[in-house]
């Protein structure tokens, strides 16, 4: 059975393209509060689960030992733009652990954001691993590993203790068994594990509420999510959807994108979390889906609801600034 | 009824994302030789129909008056990368008509191709209309308009004689009525008309074979398609799918992409043409679909068939060059 069309892209009076997908919102007990599509299908969370992967940095005591605040913790959970402030802070985190960018195993790439890329092209011969969107996450891995006396070499590999620890954390949070069968390699070379979409949402609901978690993990989870909400620029960057969503309701909404059309989000005060995937992997659609799903939980706050729906339904203009169409969510998100 | 999944994107041993779509191949009489999905659904051809929009340049006599060769005609049918050679040739075409880039109404944008964009960022303060991927098409419009004494002002508008002429040509080729109801505005501000996918394919089959066309139009159509096949770099550019497909079988395959996952192609020697759309508008999938559809018509030439299938099924590597997955077509394309 096909997943439903959740987002349409219009041109003139017609629908030009359609995006299907699956979305689920659950509470801390895993109860489904809203869903569309095949929510038991397995998805690779990709970068949407970086806050889960950031737990060793806090739980190990490394974050406290280095006096890391919200910015460093947010960067450890980020897919950043590679803006100068992002690259600088990643370098600072590595320096706190007594190492430098030469230990990063994430690879290097130019920024995905055109204005940032243009700035980089004018100032750099080539990007470094510090500009990789995952450099903050990797810096977090490295700080935790150094603090607990782990050898760094090959820290991105499935069998390395760094990844084994993360695997255990993600099994605890998602309630899914993770092994080589459901493992792929992510853009930054670490393992990424396919889990049922509903379990991914439940993992974030546990992080947001502490439900069913050991006290230390519950505390570390709340701290990471609070750090992201407090410093949304360090989770993504200028003009990015994660940053904008979190700025829309400061301290109340957590949101994190992943490659191939994944988005996770949480509303801690309401005790719910969201996971979704656009079937075809398209970011523009996943951004509309997450905004519309979040909006469903704020119907009693018209201004906030409208601000979120304005991110779900967006106007598209051409090179001359002429309105040519819209990206809009379908009735699947109606209350 | 949902369109079938035509392309899968894998990671590790799992399918991570899926692309649905519709594809049709027809002969000069409009007989369907292969199809998948809803081929009577209307689609905006976007830039995939630029060869149709290039006909006034030839039919008006402007191309001959200015001594334009294959490169100029290919550029008039192009969505180019904005590489220096593309921008220079667009300027040369405008100069032949006695005007300059100030008359272009397409707007300006940085190249969509990262390596080209990096070069532009290092050499330009900002891109000009000559760098717009549509500048060659607009230069063609302008040369034809100047040659036939049309006023240039507002040549991108629906009611302008330039667009009225193109509308008539496209009605003749596609056998579809074009009017404001099925009209949208394209990225470069000209009208784009939604037509049934099958009719779009038939229009290109008429161009490739001359079937049912007036002799002058049949001749101009063959000349434009031959020019694109002779100068594929000027139709797209470095590392682009259109260019690579046409280089795979020099003089035998015509291929042209359009925004939002459209692709048109023709094999003149076999008298067939192809039109397809990825439902969700994704280029990576449309590129796989067109290569696999073309390959179906070359099963008796194993090397060419393999070269096309190598463009349909592509390996994906991450920032460290590690193989992470593949883009591959589904059994829908099996012989």
Image (cartoon, coloured by chain):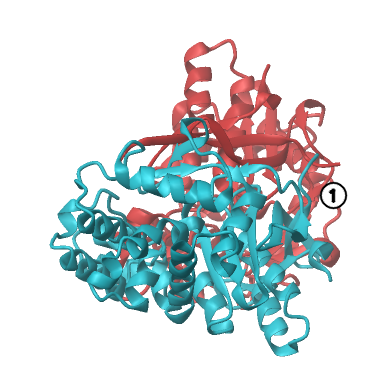
Chain colours: A red, B cyan
The residue furthest left is B98
Q: Nearer the viewer, residue A224 or B113?
A: B113
> x, y percentage for residue A288?
57, 35
> x, y percentage for residue B161?
31, 43
* Identity of the residue drawn at 23% across and 70% down: B65
Q: Quick check: A173 above or below B312?
A: above
Q: Nearer the viewer, residue A167 or A37?
A: A37
**Is B175 placed left or right of B99 in the picture?**
right
Per the image, the residue denoted by label 1 is: A176
> x, y percentage for residue B9?
71, 62
Classify residue A263 by image quadrant: top right
| Residue B249 visible in the snapshot | yes
Q: What's the chain of the residue with tag 1?
A: A
**Is A283 placed left or right of A23 in the picture?**
left
Q: Nearer the viewer, residue A209 or A143?
A: A209
**Is A220 placed left or right of B225 in the picture?**
right
The residue furthest front is B215
* Identity of the residue drawn at 28% across and 53% down: B108
| Residue B132 visible in the snapshot | no
* Identity of the residue drawn at 82% across and 40% down: A38
> x, y percentage for residue B129?
25, 56
Where is the N terminus of chain B found, in terms of image quarters? top right
Q: Secondary structure at mark 1?
A: loop
Classify residue B276 by image quadrant: bottom right
* Identity of the residue drawn at 60% across and 35% down: A8
Where is the C terminus of chain B found, in terms of image quarters? bottom right
Q: Quick check: B303 above or below B241?
A: below
């Amino acid at each position: 059975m096909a997943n439903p069309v959740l987002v349409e892209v219009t041109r003139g009076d017609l629908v030009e393209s359609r995006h299907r997908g699956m979305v689920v919102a659950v509470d801390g007990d895993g109860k489904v509060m809203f869903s569309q599509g095949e929510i038991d299908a397995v998805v690779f969370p990709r970068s949407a689960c970086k806050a889960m992967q950031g737990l060793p940095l806090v739980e190990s005591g490394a974050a406290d030992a280095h006096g890391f605040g919200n910015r460093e913790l947010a960067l450890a959970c980020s897919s950043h733009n590679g803006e100068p402030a992002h690259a600088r802070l990643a370098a600072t985190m590595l320096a706190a652990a007594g190492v430098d960018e030469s230990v990063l195993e994430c690879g290097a790439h130019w920024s995905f954001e055109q204005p940032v890329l243009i700035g980089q092209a004018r100032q750099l011969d080539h990007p470094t691993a510090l500009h990789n969107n995952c450099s903050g996450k990797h810096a977090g891995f490295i700080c935790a590993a150094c603090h607990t006396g782990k050898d760094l070499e090959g820290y991105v590999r499935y069998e390395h203790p760094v990844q084994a620890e993360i695997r255990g954390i993600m099994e605890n949070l998602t309630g899914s068994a993770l092994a080589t069968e459901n493992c792929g390699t992510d853009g930054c070379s670490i393992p990424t594990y396919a889990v049922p979409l509903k379990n991914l949402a439940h993992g974030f609901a546990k992080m947001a509420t502490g439900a069913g978690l050991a006290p230390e993990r519950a505390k570390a989870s709340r701290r990471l999510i609070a750090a992201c909400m407090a410093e949304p620029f360090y989770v993504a960057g200028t003009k990015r959807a994660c940053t904008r969503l979190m700025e829309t309701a400061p301290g109340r909404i957590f949101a994190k994108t992943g490659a191939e059309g994944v988005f996770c989000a949480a509303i801690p005060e309401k005790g719910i979390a969201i996971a979704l995937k656009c079937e075809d992997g398209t970011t523009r659609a996943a951004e509309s889906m997450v905004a519309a799903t979040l909006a469903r939980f704020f119907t009693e706050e018209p201004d906030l609801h409208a601000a979120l729906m304005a991110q779900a339904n967006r106007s598209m203009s051409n090179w001359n600034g002429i309105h040519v169409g819209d990206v809009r969510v379908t009735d699947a998100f109606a209350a």
